[in-house]
Image: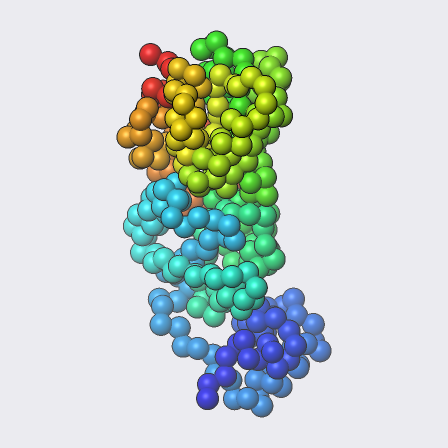
């Protein structure tokens, strides 16, 4: 029976990534550990898996961090743009699947990347950076993060200027005469959720507006969470806000449904602005005013930044991409 890296790891009491590092001659493994692994390799007759891909020069790993929604339109568009741009130079994409976080072997991205000898990786943001993503980020494999902050010497990241998104929304509401503005944010454990929240709070302060904490709720960027968050907000005692900023279009669409079910109208009773400008936003009723994130630009920049790291250039470690307010019917602007 063929021995796997995972079995070698169990036999020697180390992680699969450490076994991979020894196999690929990484220098940061202690001599005692290295000798133990080499002895196990000799005793078991382990033979490295033959790489059926076009070796390091032409394989890019695609990794979704824990909590990232592979089905979200934003990430689909970014990866589509990235694939087209980097594909022009002959690179192929290899998607790494993941299951539950408890299945550690599934999440040992560094070991898997070393095994198939990728040239670099694009990592899609999710919750806080998990151990296995951080290990890959800190390795010498070039990595580019989208909506996730990477700090390794061979890593960089880019995202929309999420703090400025909040300012664009609050400013537009302010110009329309709204002073009582509610907020449905994403998970604060996600970089994007945290930055959009900070942007909203900062913009409210800049315009001399108070954030009413009873009008602040949170979801997970999915439509159902926006619906439930808005229901909670509407059930609270006291006056209702005249406007709502939902930090994601799907949450905004869910919130609009909850507002309608409560017997209120959008935008007459509560104006709504979302964020992402997914295709669905223009077809809901009323059509959703939102922040357009330039997914094509983000994907292309990610491709060029990753190639710079692959080719040995330090490149730019972080890039903020500007976004645009797209005005439709849901905010009440004519």
* Residue for point 54% across, 28% down: 235
Give the color scheme: rainbow, by chain, secondary structure or one colour.
Answer: rainbow
Q: Position of residue 76 (x, y in %)?
A: 36, 46
Q: Looking at the picture, does residue 59 appear above or below residue 291?
A: below
Q: Position of residue 93 (x, y in %)?
A: 36, 57
* Residue for point 43% across, 61% down: 97
Q: Looking at the picture, does residue 20 appear above or below residue 57?
A: below
Q: Looking at the picture, does residue 304 appear above or below residue 171?
A: below
Q: Position of residue 328 (x, y in %)?
A: 34, 21
Res. 107 in view: yes
Occupied quadrant, residue 207: top right
Depth check: give the residue in front, 145 or 35. 145
Q: Is residue 54 left or right of residue 10?
A: left
Depth check: give the residue in front, 289 or 91. 289
Res. 323 in view: no
Q: Is residue 19 left or right of residue 271?
A: right
* Residue for point 45% across, 35% down: 227
Depth check: give the residue in front, 270 or 106. 270
Occupied quadrant, residue 286: top left
Total numbered circles:
0
Q: Quadrant of the C terminus?
A: top left
* Residue for point 61% across, 26% down: 214
Q: Position of residue 318 (x, y in %)?
A: 53, 39
């Amino acid at each position: 029976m063929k021995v796997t890296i995972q079995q070698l790891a169990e036999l020697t009491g180390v992680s699969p990534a450490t076994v991979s590092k020894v196999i690929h001659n990484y220098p940061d493994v202690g001599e005692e550990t290295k000798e133990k692994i080499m002895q196990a390799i000799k005793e078991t007759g382990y033979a490295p898996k033959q790489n059926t891909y076009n070796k390091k020069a032409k394989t890019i790993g695609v990794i979704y961090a824990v909590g990232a929604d592979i089905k979200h339109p934003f990430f689909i568009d970014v990866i589509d743009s990235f694939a087209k741009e980097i594909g022009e130079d002959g690179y192929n994409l290899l998607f790494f699947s993941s299951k539950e976080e408890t299945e550690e072997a599934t999440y040992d991205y560094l070991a898997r990347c070393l095994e198939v000898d990728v040239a670099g990786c694009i990592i899609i943001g999710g919750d806080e950076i998990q151990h296995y993503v951080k290990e890959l980020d800190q390795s010498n494999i070039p990595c580019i993060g989208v909506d996730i902050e990477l700090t390794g010497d061979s890593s960089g990241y880019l995202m929309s200027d999420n703090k400025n998104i909040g300012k664009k929304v609050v400013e537009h509401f302010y110009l329309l005469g709204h002073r009582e503005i509610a907020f449905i944010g994403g998970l604060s454990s996600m970089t994007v959720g945290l930055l959009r929240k900070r942007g909203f709070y900062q913009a409210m302060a800049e315009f001399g507006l108070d954030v009413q904490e009873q009008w602040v709720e949170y979801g997970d960027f999915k439509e159902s969470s926006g619906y439930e968050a808005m229901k909670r907000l509407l059930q609270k005692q006291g006056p209702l806000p005249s406007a709502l900023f939902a930090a994601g279009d799907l949450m905004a669409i869910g919130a609009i449904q909850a507002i309608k079910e409560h017997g209120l109208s959008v935008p007459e009773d509560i104006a709504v602005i979302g964020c992402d400008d997914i295709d669905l936003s223009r077809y809901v009723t009323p059509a959703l005013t939102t922040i357009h994130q330039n997914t094509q630009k983000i994907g292309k920049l990610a491709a060029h930044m990753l190639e710079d790291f692959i080719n040995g250039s330090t490149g730019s470690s972080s890039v903020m991409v500007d976004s645009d307010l797209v005005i439709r019917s849901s905010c009440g602007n004519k």
